Amino acid sequence: RREDEMGDEGRVSGSLYSGDHEHYEFLSEVFAHYAHANVLQRDMYPSATKFEGEIIAMVSSLLHGDTAKGFAGVVTSGGSESLVTALFATFGESEFVARLPDAVFGVLTISLVYLFAARRYGPGAGLLAAGVLLGAESYLVIHGVRDSAQDSLLTLLAFVMVWTWIVFRQR
């Protein structure tokens, strides 16, 4: 398929887990067996707990981990869940820790919006743009931090992408 060309040529980083189409077919076969199951309901699907334990045991063995010395693990689906899980493991479980990434990325986004607008239109426009973003009820820094949604990283990256596009377009 045309959409797979970049990945097949090895020209992407982080978007694909493997460029091997035989492996994709194998994954599709495995997924077909479990696609209907919500593995978070461990009482209905205890095999999920077993799978997770086996994966953690394999990784522990590869890393020469010792459960007697505190080696432990958890399987996550990636992205924000992995980030928050790592923060919990490092700093302990709390509402503050869960909301920390969203707050940090939100502050970075507002700062970049200020810098972008200030450079292009002056400091007053920068303050106005940052203030509008900060005060917008629908913006994820305010709403997201309150609800502990982890979407401000996406907002930050989208803004950086647009800024980069504008800068390169001007050259």
Image (cartoon, rainbow, N blue to C red):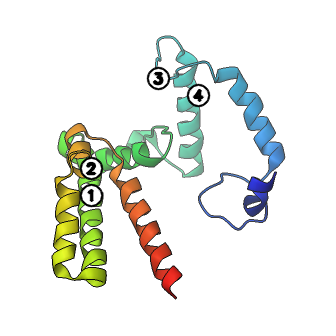
Disc on the earlier residue, 2 or 4 = 4
The part of the image, by quadrant, that contains residue 30 is top right
Q: Amino acid at mark 1?
A: Gly
Q: Nearer the viewer, mark 4 or mark 1?
A: 1
Write down the residue under mark 1.
106
User: Which badge, 4 or 1, is on the more N-terminal residue?
Assistant: 4
**Residue wearing tag 4:** 51
**Is the C-beta separation of discs 2 and 1 under 8 Å?**
yes
Compared with 24, 28 (above or below) is above
Q: Residues within 10 Å of mark 1 (few under 14, many from 20)?
A: many
Q: Determine the residue positioned at 79% across, 55% down.
A: 2
**Tag 3: residue type?**
Leu
Q: CA distance from mark 4 to mark 1?
A: 36 Å
Does label 1 or label 3 sit earlier along the sequence? Answer: 3
Q: For mark 4, does the 10 Å Cα neighbourhood hold few (<14), some (14 to 19), or many (20 or more) residues?
A: few
Residue 107 position within the rendered picture, expressed as x and y whole percent measured from the top left: 23, 62
Name the mark nearer the viewer: 2 or 4.
2
Judged by depth in the image, the label closer to the viewer, 1 or 3, is 1
Which of pointers 2 and 1 lies earlier in the amino acid sequence? Answer: 1
Give how far across and how far down residue 52 sits, in percent: 54, 31
Residues at discs 4 and 3 in contact (Cβ within 8 Å): no
